[in-house]
Amino acid sequence: MEFVNPLQFLKDKTILVTGATGFLGKVFVEKILRIQPNVKKLYLLVRAADAKSAMKRILDEVEKDLFNVLRDKLGANFKSFVLEKVVAVVGDVSEVNLGVKDSKLMEEMYKEIDLVVNSAATTDFDERYDFAFNINTMGALNIMSFAKNCIKINMVLHVSTAYVCGEGSGLIPEKPFYNGETLKCTCRLEITEEKKLIEEKLNQLPAQGAAKNELTSTMKELGIQRARFYGWPNTYVFTKAMGEMILGKYSDNLPLVIIRPSMITSTFAEPFPGWIEGLRTIDGPIAGYGKGTLKFLLANPKVICDMMPVDMVVNSMITAMTANTRQSSQMIYQVGSSMRNPIKFTNVHKFARQYFVENPLIDKAGKPIRVSKCTFFKTSASFYTYMRIRYVMPLKVLKLISVFDKKYKDVCIGHGKKIKFAMRLVDLYKPYMFFKGIFDDTNSQKLRMEVGKSGLVDAFNFDPKSIDWEDYIINTHIVGLVKYVLKG
Ligand SMILES: NC(=O)c1ccc[n+]([C@@H]2O[C@H](COP(=O)([O-])OP(=O)(O)OC[C@H]3O[C@@H](n4cnc5c(N)ncnc54)[C@H](OP(=O)(O)O)[C@@H]3O)[C@@H](O)[C@H]2O)c1
């Protein structure tokens, strides 16, 4: 591993970034622009109708608080600096040539790009199979093909997820998938067959007169079915795992870095602590708890909740890029906290409770929402029994009443839908609430040591040991969640 200063490495580089309108991609772009203003150019691939609306999407993104530090630093020059460094490219990773239609622009990109960073993905656990496959799996192939056309390309950095391991337990190694690998040793996975299956379904369903919502639900079910058939718990991690396989197969001699973060949370330190966007991973339950709507969970409180702040994930990306630029093989970095600084669900709950007791959210009537201890159901049997008594039986009574009194009919339908939705979420999240794996991060640790030796620890920290979870969750993460997501 050859480690040069990332600032030197980034100087005069041209980088293609996908997913820059998303949570992680945006933090990556901000950091590059802030720490190395002499980066040559950032091509940001954005889904948009035309170049003007693509640029508008980027300008809207840089208006966000995340860019305040850079905006303050540059003052009146901020917008011109962004316009000088950033080129918005209309495109779509699910299409051949990344959907770039402007041939002149494409030629320029082929000539200029040094690095490709792929952070685009659909992260819905139960996304339609065709959508998830096209973005997370074929998208990876399209990225690799595009990168190979770039004449001075140094490497491709692909963001995957630590949970491509499925419901693994014990120490989960930083090892690549081999092509065709499944999590069940009884079968082999043929990605081309999956593609065919999707195409067949997409032809069949409309021919059989399926309505749009039927097509959506059938394709969603198909994704879950195929994932579980091969041993993955959901469509998202299954299609991400296939993305890794495809990259490994087609990377040839092009250096390939795969970053596998665990659950990504708000910024730890940079550009300032607590910035976050959207309700993701543990934040749905934390927000539900604070709002008083989540009072019980099907989860093992002793299970480790593997989280990594987003700025630390970005630091791992930048340093991994720097370290691997001349390597001709595939390198995988698991970026999580379970190995070196684990925190259990019970403590996440304890700290969240402490926060919301001291800083209750305010309800619509202006009253503070009181939170009490959340009940953890450690087995599905106890959880489903509780659900039956508390929700399903009253629903049956309501249904009976609505036969005689029609005014209860809508209430009844509403309750039924809520129960179905809650059960679907429970089913999708359950594997993570009982997850027994620890992500080995030996490669990441070696990288941290290189960063340490070069005296750059503070600028590129991604050591989970530097996180005091109690302080981070109470004073940074939930504060940020309330400010930027729940908007006070
Ligand atoms: N968030 C986590 O906790 C977590 C954990 C582990 C790994 N990861 C991985 O980290 C990466 C970034 O995740 P995130 O949380 O930042 O997700 P995110 O906020 O949902 O952002 C996803 C980004 O991908 C873009 N995108 C989706 N489909 C696209 C397509 N067909 N063509 C071009 N761009 C497309 C989205 O663009 P639009 O704005 O147009 O939708 C958006 O910019 C993903 O690869 C994800 O698998 C995330």
Image (cartoon, helix red, strand yellow):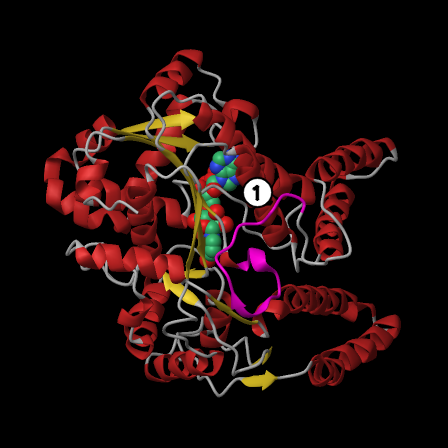
The main secondary structure of the magenta stretch is loop
Q: Is residue 29 above or below residue 445?
A: above
Q: Is residue 257 above or below residue 413?
A: above
Q: Is residue 186 visible?
A: yes
Quadrant position of residue 325: top left
Quadrant position of residue 105: top left
Residue 175 in magenta? yes
- Observer-nearest residue: 330 or 486? 330
User: For the point 40% across and 26% down, which residue is it?
Assistant: 89
Badge 1 amino acid: Gly
Quadrant position of residue 442: bottom left
Position of residue 430 measured from the top left corner of the image (x, y, whole percent) = 63, 70
Image quadrant holding the C terminus, namely bottom left
Q: Is residue 117 visible?
A: no
Q: Residues within 10 Å of mark 1 (few under 14, many from 20)?
A: many
Position of residue 93 measured from the top left corner of the image (x, y, whole percent) = 52, 32
User: For the point 33% across and 83% down, which residue is it?
Assistant: 358
Relative to 213, is 239 on the left or the right? left
Q: Which residue is mark 1?
A: 243
Q: What segment carries the magenta color?
A: 163-180
- Observer-nearest residue: 391 or 193? 193
